[in-house]
Image (cartoon, coloured by chain):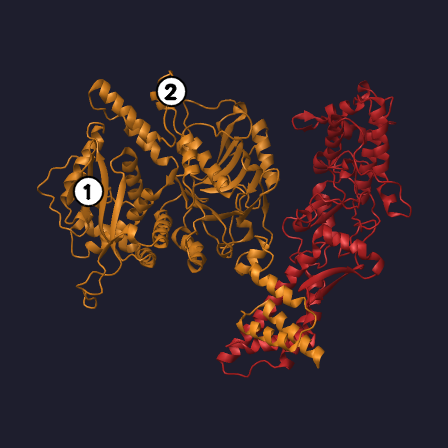
Amino acid sequence: MRLRYLHLQNYPPISDIKVCFASGSPLERECAIRFVVGVNGSGKSNLLRAVAEVFLAIADGRRAPFPVRLIYELGHRDSSRFRTLVLDWLGDRQSASLWIGDRYVFPDNATTEQLDQTFLCLSTESSEIPAEFRPLIRRGEWPAGSVTPQVIALPSAVLAYTTGDLRPWRSVWSRNQRAEGFLDSGDDQQSDERPAGWTAAQERTLQAIRQTEAEAAPRGMSGGNAEAGRFRRPVLLDATLLKCALLAVALPQAFVETTDYPGRAELDAAMAQLRRRSDNKTSMQELLERGGWHHLVSVAFRSRLQAAEWDRKLCETAHDWWLCASEVIAEPHPVEARRTLLFDLMGSFDAQASSYASAASEELQTCTSQGEALWALLGGAQDASAFDLFARLLELNQVGLFDDVLIRLRRAPAPGDANVTEVDDIGVLRYEELSDGEQMVLGRMALFHLLQGQQDALLLLDEPETHFNDKWKREIVDIIDDAIGHTSNDVLISTHSAIVLSDVFNNEIVMVQKTPHGSNVRSVDEPTFGTDPSALMMTVFGADDSIGKRAQEFIEGKLAQATGTQAEIADLERLIARMGSGFYRSELRTLLNTWRGGDA
Amino acid sequence: MLKPIHRVTCYPALAACRHLMQRFALWLCAPGTTATSLTSAGLQPPVMPSAIEAEWLWGFLQTKKDKRPLLERAQLIVAMPPAQKVALAAWVQAVSALATQFQAAPPPWPVTGPPTDPANWAAFRTLMEAFYDKGFHAGLPYAEDGTPVAAGGVNYALFVDAFRVAHRLNPDPHARQVCVLCGGPLGDTPHVDHWVIKSAFPLLSMCGDNLTLICSTCNEAPNKGDKPVHSAGSFADWFHPYLRPGNGALQLGYDLHAAAVHCSAVVLADQPKATNLDGLLNLGSRWTREFKAEYAKHQDVLRRSESRRVRAAQARHTLQELDTYVQQWVGNLSPSEPHHEVHITLGQAMTEPARMQAWLAELATVQ
């Protein structure tokens, strides 16, 4: 996945922007990391949301409700499945089109004009179209009901994450929900209206309840198809899903530790496979420890049991989950059957006594600990990557098997190891008891590592560096690069941080500018790679000076003074003694020398 | 304007295009021209100077802007009432005489557009700007020396290349190029600038004396942007890239008390022009920024060298060594590098004894 070109209109505050994304970094990374910067309110987040909305629209087989043109690449450039997609929704419905170019690459240095020219060729279907191109959806044929281009035109995953307010993002997601559920009834009853923030999943549950009420019979297996499609639909990561991501990444980690003892043959094979990636494991473990995480102790899922509404397949899954959990705790509630399913990862697990209903039953028979059982329930025994685990968790969360994940962990090794005494041990912590910053760092690092073995994914990060101290900010690009630098994923990051920008090249930065006529973009000409962040503050963000305004005004007041008395000289000496080094201190020294020179 | 600006080799082609525009605009405003004359045959000589230009112009009028052919705009102008036509023709004549503004006793400059209907003015503006947006990008009907050619005429890309070549200070193709206005780096994405903005004076959209290639920082707000390059119609206190060049007339100076680099004129009489140019491009503050950056760079080099010496238990820098460092660095400055003038200013400031002593005291604080 690689975004190449975006032409966006009428997406307030963005009026009309054309962005030619940099391609071919001098660092020779397969993964593209690009940055969007700008002052507050310039529309950085909106640019990210617009990209998300385009892919949501493709996933839902619709056209985005704003004019947009997008060129992106899917697949590895050397592979035979590589393709360039050219999407043109700039005009009305009649002129909307989607073209695909198999194994066609726009040159890395293609300019906006050249790409615009391509759009012109494609829209007029002139003879200058490169031979590799064929229309997926031709002009005037939108939408092509029978042909669903999702599989060929969508990245393998689109994940969006924001540290800001989730509401505007949610509204983008709910604006794009499928219309199926809504078009059934034409009448305007109050009961057919939905509150704000109502999701497609909720709607389906509601429809299911109504249906069961009417028929008093469980639904069949019809949900399977919709579920397969939903996984490729862009995902907005909220707190719960971020914890799922963390769990998906940390579970294999914990699993390796629990099976350090000689196990069964299949598990040995799984272990060997994990050990081949042992360098990943250590880098991941390091990151986890930075976030105050030593190891995972237990995982609990909060669920609302709705056996009547769930379809049969889901009931079977739930049945196994209930059987495998070490404890199922009922929460008091007047209407709903609320349960918390606890998996104690190190706890022993006896598979023989139970009979399983779901597909994972064979793997479950061989499990010896609850960690392994959970791993098997999530499909981990089949050499699944962290992303597969996450996809499974996401699917189960969306169909309503669980609402929340509770993670418990240890900050330090458990006592019992020779050098840790009982007194020092602070015991098991809930994830929520970690500091804000630690939770953030764990969640975000998990997100990057989630995509490690994944290809063709798009990650949209809205100001991922907020809550980080300056030292962590300095490392964030490196962490992304380490985790997914050699995968063909694309990361689009909006940021305010000059510190982050010192890690990237200026052509990888898109600067959004606020003007009275809406926002537009400009390229950043000043070199940024390996540049001092305080210099970037001035060149990219247009700060007047590298020091704070208060200090600057005071010092400039001093400098304006032509001569000084003895007392003022003594004052200035004291000030200099307490100042940090730099332009202003040495200029004040120069001033001091001229004052002294004048006296002598 | 810090650097000399030359007319490029394809200047005659640009001048020919401006004449064509002027001739065409005046013909549209002529009382005898009606909608029926606006045909391929109607444009043939003697209306246009040659058949090649007439053919090109007819093709040009078929190009679409905002989904409507330019011909519709021309038809709108032809259909204007006679009074408006006279006013527009007078305006065209006045704007065409841009060069006279830089001679003694210039005629009045039309600060506002001609008194025509806004719709007609918009049509005229679109039509004239299209000579640049569409015509120039696709190619003019002129060879570099201004002779009409049916194909392979001068275009935008050729002009940009020619301008780059004519103003290249260092012949090495990899060397960074310098912006002729501010002396900074030209950058990867320089802009073709209309010195007198084309939105207010569309007739000057294709004028050899009005086009320069400058860095994007100079061209964009809050620097040049859409600001006027005259004071209420008077060009007396303004430099002009070609007609009243400012190179050699400007000088830089560092003022300790303001901690800033100032842009001033060498000759006192030029001071208002220098002040106006500084206001237009914010040269002083931009140069100050570069001055501080370079200042910080050298101080950093010295501090790191000092700390290496401290670690190796060697003697610290002496005043003599500091002086040698500055001399050597100033001696190595090349006039073809971006920001050369700012660096020279810094070099001069560095040699002042008070500052040299201050730097030595700064280095003494390195642990």
Q: Whole-percent x and y of residue A481?
A: 42, 53
Query: Which residue is the site of mark 2?
Result: A183
Q: Whole-percent x and y of residue A384?
A: 28, 44
Have a look at marks 1 and 2 and say if they share a chain.
yes
Q: Which chain is red?
A: B
- Looking at marks 1 and 2 on the same chain, the residue that comes earlier in the sequence is marked by 2
Q: Chain of mark 2?
A: A
Q: As displayed, is residue B129 above or below residue B263?
A: above
Whether label 1 touches label 2, CB < 8 Å = no
Q: What's the residue type where badge 1 is placed?
A: Leu
- Quarter containing the N terminus of chain B: bottom right
Q: Residue A223 appears in which quarter of the rendering? A: top left
Q: Whole-percent x and y of residue B46?
A: 88, 27
Residue under the point 21% across and 41% down: A377
Query: Which residue is the site of mark 1?
Result: A341
Indicate the secondary structure of the residue bearing disc 1. Answer: strand
